[in-house]
Amino acid sequence: MLFGHGDDFYNAQNEVRINFSSNVWHGAILDQLKKHLEEQFDQLKRYPEPDAGSIRRLLSHRFEIPEESVLVTNGSISAFYLIAQAWQGAQSMIPMPAFAEYEDACRLYQHRLSFFPTSEDLAALSVEGQDLCWICNPNNPDGKFWRRANLLSFIAAHPQTVFIVDQAYASFTVEETLRPEDLKNHKNLILIYSISKAYHIPGLRIGYLMADKELVARIYPYLIPWSVNALAIEASRFILSHPAQFTLPIRKWQRETVEFISLLSRLEELEVLPTSTTFFLVRLKKGKASGLKEYLLKKKGILIRDASNFRGLDGSYIRLCTQTASENRECAEGIKEWLEQV
């Protein structure tokens, strides 16, 4: 899906003052990173590392796993396409609703697809005959979370299936996610992460995957040389070398999410779905998501995510990602005004 994601800021006909549509940590302080990148501007005068090797080494050292078990990609989304290509024609199982790019990547490389609802208990889910099973944890767009112990047991019980667990939002929850050391005892596991979401730099497109070295060796030949640009490499090097400067205050953000949900829940015409993280789905009991999105953008300069193009959802769903307390109140008030007019 080339278009249709959240954060369609580029497509807005009105000024966007507040962006609730993108699942990105809004409070990152980027002054030092900006200064560093300005100092590294001359890096653009030469080609970057073909495979972002310095970042591979940094990640290998940080997580104490072999360098051969890491692959750096042009955003986590590139990892999905590389995996789908490496298993071209495979049988793939995908949850719904979920990030559309799993399905799009698989279709591009002729996978045979089946789907399961995120509400389904893993213990009852059959993956017989599946080459790949894709899981986002926490899940986008609904914030569904599969507990670590349950997920690891499920993966261990099905060694014939490769499980791709997208943990791009691992920093957005207080729940215990899978760990790099879990790869040691789960040779059929691929973990995918985003550097850009938790540090408010999605425009730089930087992510990585980790897996047993045999799985990485299968994916590596499809990596496009220089696919991670020089500034993205420099930004990642700076972030990984200065972790204390980029600590996401998740408990505070989640408290603000609870308060935001409480505000919205006072509106009888809305249903806020449970979430484990700082973004969540809202079902409109009247009106359409497209109409609310248009109203908020035109009248308030507020951008939200119309979630109707997620498989399994319809035109009554929006997705919101918590912003500051005052911005959350402004969004809730704008939705209330729209509901009164519908």
Image (tube, grey):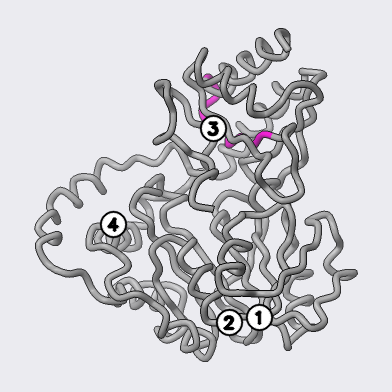
| Residue 311 locus on image (x, y percent) | 71, 51
Amino acid under label 2? Answer: Trp
Residue 62 as seen in the image, left or right of residue 105 = left
Q: Above or below — where is 77 with respect to 47? A: above
**Which one is earlier in the sequence, the residue at label 4 or at label 2?**
2
Residue 241 included in the magenta stretch of the image: no
**Which one is earlier in the sequence, the residue at label 2 or at label 3?**
3
> Residues in magenta?
318-326
Amino acid under label 3? Answer: Phe
The residue beneath circle 2 is 87
**Which one is earlier in the sequence, the residue at label 1 or at label 3?**
3
Residue 56 or residue 78, whichever sits in front? 78
Residue 50 or residue 331, whichever sits in front? 50
Q: Whole-Å distance between the Cαs marked 2 and 1?
A: 6 Å
- Give the structural element (helix, strand or loop) at label 4: helix
Residue 295 as seen in the image, left or right of residue 270 = left
Asked if the residue under mark 4 is in contact with the one under mark 1, i.e. CB atoms within 8 Å, the reply is no
Q: Whole-Å distance between the Cαs marked 4 and 2?
A: 31 Å
Quarter of image, res 98? bottom right
Query: Which tag is nearer the camera, tag 1 or tag 3?
Result: 1
Q: Whole-Å distance between the Cαs marked 2 and 3?
A: 35 Å
Residue drawn at 65 percent across, 59 percent down? 137
How many neighbours does mark 2 have within 10 angstroms: few (below 14), some (14-19), or many (20 or more)? some
Q: Whole-Å distance between the Cαs marked 1 and 4?
A: 35 Å
The residue beneath circle 3 is 20
The residue beneath circle 4 is 235
Residue drawn at 56 percent across, 71 percent down? 191
How many neighbours does mark 4 have within 10 angstroms: few (below 14), some (14-19), or many (20 or more)? many
